[in-house]
């Protein structure tokens, strides 16, 4: 998300040198610190954010793929986002 409230999907440019994606490192760190996280794909993280954040309830990987980017709030009232 940027200062324009625009949510973008960031794509991998290269294979991680350490063998793990950033989200996997974050998940491992959280688990090591006693905060259980169990995800198999970054889309699951986006789904959880959408479930817990009212202004992101309409955001999904599929919608980001289709629209390219979305400005929050994106919810039932504004299904394709809310331009500034």
Image (cartoon, helix red, strand yellow):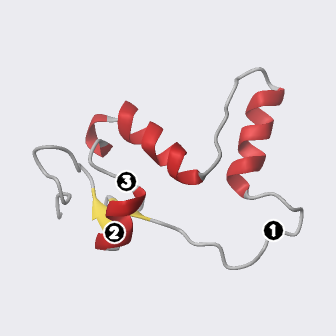
Q: Which mark is residue 46?
A: none
Mark 1 vs mark 3: give the one in front: 3
- Mark 2 surroundings: few (<14), some (14-19) or many (≥20) residues within 10 A: some
Q: Position of residue 66 (x, y in %)?
A: 31, 71
Camera-nearest residue between 33 and 12: 12
Count of numbered tags? 3
The answer to whether any part of residue 20 appears in the image is: yes
Where is mark 3, residue-wise? 60
Query: Residue at image x 17%, y 64%?
Result: 83
Mark 3 vs mark 2: give the one in front: 3
* In this rendering, position of residue 63 left or right of residue 11: left
Q: Position of residue 54 (x, y in %)?
A: 28, 35
Q: Which mark is residue 69?
A: 2
Query: Residue at image x 67%, y 79%?
Result: 13
Instruction: Report the residue that reaches farthest toward the left.
Output: 77
Label 3: element kind: loop
Q: Position of residue 60 (x, y in %)?
A: 37, 53
| C-alpha gap between disc 2 and disc 1 | 25 Å
Where is mark 1, residue-wise? 16
User: Sequence order check: which comes first, mark 2 or mark 1?
Assistant: 1
User: Sequence order check: which comes first, mark 1 or mark 3?
Assistant: 1
Q: Examine the image and state in which quarter residue 47 appears.
A: top left
Query: Residue at image x 20%, y 58%?
Result: 81
* In this rendering, position of residue 78 left or right of residue 59: left
- Quarter of the image where the N terminus is located: bottom left
Camera-nearest residue between 33 and 4: 33
Query: Residue at image x 51%, y 52%?
Result: 43
Label 2: element kind: strand
Instruction: Report the residue that reaches farthest toward the right.
Output: 18
* In this rendering, position of residue 63 left or right of residue 79: right
| C-alpha gap between disc 3 and disc 2 | 11 Å
User: Sequence order check: which comes first, mark 3 or mark 2?
Assistant: 3
């Amino acid at each position: 998300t940027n200062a324009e409230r625009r949510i973008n999907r960031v794509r991998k440019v290269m294979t991680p040198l350490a063998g793990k994606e950033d989200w996997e490192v974050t998940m491992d760190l959280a688990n090591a610190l006693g905060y259980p996280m169990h995800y198999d794909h970054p889309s699951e993280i986006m789904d959880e954010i959408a479930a817990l954040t009212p202004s992101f309830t309409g955001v999904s990987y599929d919608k980001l793929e289709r629209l390219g980017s979305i400005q929050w709030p994106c919810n039932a009232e504004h299904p394709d986002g809310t331009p500034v």
